[in-house]
Amino acid sequence: MEKRETENRRRCTMIVLAGGSGRRMGADLPKQFLKVNGKPLIWYALHAVEQSPLVDDCILVAAKGELPYVETQILDKYDFRKVMALAEGGRERFESVIHGLQKLREIKGAEKAASRIVMIHDGARPFLTEEIIEACFWGAEENGACVAAVPSKDTVAISDGTGIEVAVPDRRLLYQVQTPQSFRGNLAYEAFDKLAGELRGRDRLDDFSWITDDASVVAHYTGFRIRLVEGDYRNIKVTTAEDLPVAELFLPKK
């Protein structure tokens, strides 16, 4: 990684999303709290944040009913000092991001929040490394908005919705998008404030099925082009029970 001047860099907040359920895991406990090699899955991402010299603080977003558990069994138990606040999760991921951004603005004020680098990371991605954090920080610092991504190893087919293949894009142009997704704060707030305005008063979220990730929100509402920066093939999201043995294999035993 290229050596960079960090003395006058922007401040950086990592918003870690930990509002998922254990439904696809078939588990009673939400997946981010399942033990992997002796530590809750969420521990690994928070530990990477705690160790990173580029991340100044963190907001952890969790389901409302899980907030007391997170406070006592994650933050207090493991002494995560960079987590400056908890925020309540939303109905969908993008609502959770909105709540995290709102919490940051409450704490830092609108001007300071907008002047920061804001990274958004899935708490169920335990393989967050300093190399990925650096790539995402400088990608946003220099380009405004970026996502961690890796070239697709597989051929991807597009279907017509009935199981019939209609197109096969050139694999050389395809990337698997990961997190963190990183933005200058002013771009993040412009996009998610507009989204929050459209969500206000809506009971159903069907009209927002086009939102695939945080970058899609920023691109849609600001027109900003998102840069891809180097992720890591190990930076998987633990989603189903089949992912747990992989995580156990690669994560250090604590």
Image: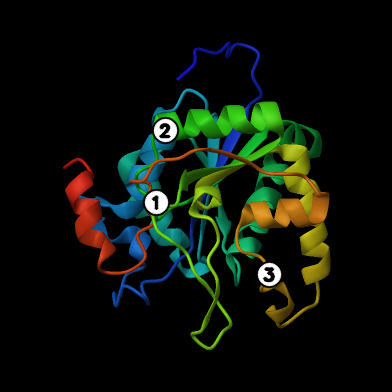
Identified at 25% across, 53% down, the residue is 247
Closest to the camera, between mark 3 and mark 1, is 3
Q: Is residue 191 above or below residue 105?
A: below
- In space, the residues marked 2 and 3 are separated at their CA atoms by 33 Å
Identified at 16% across, 42% down, the residue is 253
- In space, the residues marked 3 and 1 are separated at their CA atoms by 23 Å
Residue under label 2, please give it.
Answer: 50
Identified at 69% across, 78% down, the residue is 205
Residue under label 1, please give it.
Answer: 125
Q: Earlier in the sequence, mark 3 or mark 1?
A: 1
Q: Earlier in the sequence, mark 2 or mark 3?
A: 2
- In space, the residues marked 1 and 2 are separated at their CA atoms by 15 Å
Q: Residues within 10 Å of mark 1 (few under 14, many from 20)?
A: many
Closest to the camera, between mark 2 and mark 3, is 3
| Position in image of residue 89 (x %, y %) | 57, 63
Identified at 65% across, 51% down, the residue is 215
